[in-house]
Image (tube, rainbow, N blue to C red):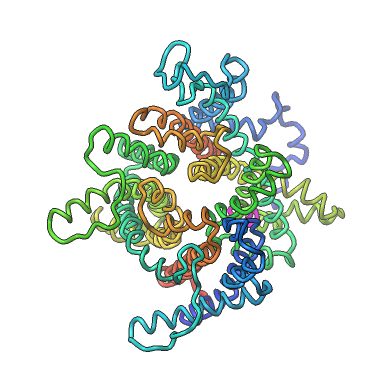
Amino acid sequence: MTDDTNVNPIGALSDPMPSAPPRSQWVAVWEQFKTHKGALLGGIIFLIILLAVTIGPWVWPYDPTYIDIRARNQGPSFAHPLGTDQLGRDTLARMMAGGQVSVAVGITAMLLALVLGSFIGVLAGFFKRLDGPLMRLTDLFLALPLLPLLLVMVLLFRDPLNAAFGPETGIFILIVCAIGVTSWMPTARIVRGDVLALKEREFVLAARSIGTKNTKMITRHILPNVLSPIMVSATLGIANAIITESALSFLGLGFPPDFPTWGRLLFDATDYLQQYPERVFWPGLAISLTVLSVNYLGDGLRDALDPRIRGR
Amino acid sequence: MLTFTVRRLVLAVPTLLFISLVIFLLLELAPGDPMAQVPLTVPPEVKEKMREALGLGQPMHVRFLKWLVQFFWVEPQVLFDHIFGTGFAEGKLRVLSWQTRSPVMDIVVQRIPQTLWVVGLSYVIGVLIALPIGIYSAYRQYSIFDQVGTFISMIGFSVPTFFTGVLLIVIFSVNLGWFPSIYDTTHKVTDWDSFVFQMRQLAMPVFVLALYNAAQISRFMRASMLDNLNQDYVRTARAKGLGERAVVLVHVLRNSMIPVVTVIALGAPQVFAGAIITEQVFKVNGLGHLLIGAIEANDLPTVQTLTFIFALLIVLFNIIADVLYGILDPRIRYD
């Protein structure tokens, strides 16, 4: 400001008024997300799968557990588009019921892992004293052999939980907790890194200077800013949880036999591999398609939420 | 660098002790009783003796210490005796399997070759496929090759191995009859024909695992190459007149390999644990198969030892990855 003659001190006030409200961040994110064709397609397919497994059983006339022994081992027909299994149960109905469980396990386990991971990540990043111990804990968990431990956990806690909550709720709680407890580490690491960087920013200093309490600081200033990495880990977490649940069911250590999930259906179908190979195909395709669409969704979300890529 | 390596190795000891304690405590909580299969007509005092024979009579911490001594002190001695023909471990109690009443490590040693054949070969093949695909995809970003390669790696990454394995069995064993669906562990390679048979039975499990590994590594390779291709030193190298081959395959590749090498090292132990499913699908009589069998039979010493071996591998390869990172990247100084 050396040359006073060229500067109009009230110039800013005579600028034209903005005609529209500023574009929200989420509009920009959506604009970027739309350009990623794979992610858009993945999102649509995932929504269709979600709708099919939630609404499908209400619409479809057959019950997944209804046994019609005279109609067993049928091929595709008008009444049973995907055929029937060795007890005459409708495969389409079982696929939808199984999908409901698989997707529910995936989403619940992801939420648990996300809450645990964000909680530990924010604590470790925000409070210097907790950083060392919590990160050592994360390293320890990362060094555990996860699949063997999951198998052991299912073996050990299946019977007590079955006795306490009934066979279906018990195994659901067990599998969700087991997957959640063993998959929060990547989220915690990413969130901690972001929180460490955010803590040095001016707006945190400003908030601190007007006396913001720690809890308010985290909920009001830190958490909204680490939302994007959390959302990306959420999509990857769903994919991971669905695959893990199917793997457990496939190894025979998941849900009980008469309780369909995609992994369980695939496992049961391998016994009839020689005679009815198509039975393996449908649950496998459902798992793969869900995971593929969720992974694409996550890829697109990561690009859309990254401000360095957005707008290019 | 040496002090860093030594420090990491020393720090690994408490980590491993903690992990072994976690596994032990988890198994301690097991409601499954190894005596459950014993008939009801057996009198209780005999049952008590059987329980003591399995080593279950003592308190928890004594048994944990015993396991530690057996695993870290007696088993290395057995290995030493085996190699040099000495007699240090004679008469000492080893970790015994409840299923077979034979030392767990003997069974593990019997099973390792099968796992190494299938898992090791598939990992090597996966890496060899992934690296060129990743390099070329990044170099021709958004080309047809890149689009197809990214899509295939996304599929390989998303489709679980228990589905690809079963699908391959349906197509190549049931319909075409080209490959056997069950891996014959007793098969010995003696001449050309038996070698061809060995290759045929290896083909499907190795392909399944190699696809999965290649998908992950090629994604990393591509991302790492893309990071480096836009750097200033690449422009400098081109500006001073270096050939395209020298720029990409010497300057960019060497810098991009740094994170990829660590990812490959970190992935190696995960492959052992992840191969449990593939071994189950193709009935490969390896370590994963042993673990599943032991879990189903409530054979706690075997489960404990195997899980700990997997943890040991993970910790070991973590250290290898960190040390490699320090050696390869002169910007990183741990000391």
Q: Is residue B84 above or below residue A204?
A: below
| Magenta region includes residue A11 | no
- Residue A100 picture location, percent across and down: 59, 30
Number of numbered callouts drawn: 0
Is B300 on the left-hand or right-hand side of A134?
A: left
Residue shown at the point (74%, 36%) measured from the top left: A11
Residue B287 occupies quadrant = bottom left
In terms of depth relative to the viewer, which is nearer, B266 or A270?
A: A270
- Residue A106 picture location, percent across and down: 59, 39
| Magenta region includes residue A191 | yes
Residue shown at the point (69%, 59%) measured from the top left: A125
In terms of depth relative to the viewer, which is nearer, A27 or A156?
A: A156
In terms of depth relative to the viewer, which is nearer, A120 or B28?
A: B28
Q: Is residue B12 above or below residue A223?
A: below
Residue shown at the point (58%, 39%) measured from the top left: A255
Is A301 on the left-hand or right-hand side of B149?
A: right
- Answer whether residue B241 is visible to the viewer in this image: no
Q: Residue furthest top?
A: A78
- Residue B55 picture location, percent across and down: 59, 72
In terms of depth relative to the viewer, which is nearer, A191 or A78?
A: A78
Residue B142 occupies quadrant = top left
Is B14 on the left-hand or right-hand side of B116?
A: right
Q: Residue furthest left?
A: B192
- Residue range corresponding to the magenta coloring: A186-193
Q: Main secondary structure of the magenta part?
A: helix
Residue A99 occupies quadrant = top right
Q: Is residue B333 above or below residue B234?
A: below
- Answer whether residue A179 is visible to the viewer in this image: yes
Q: Residue furthest right?
A: A211
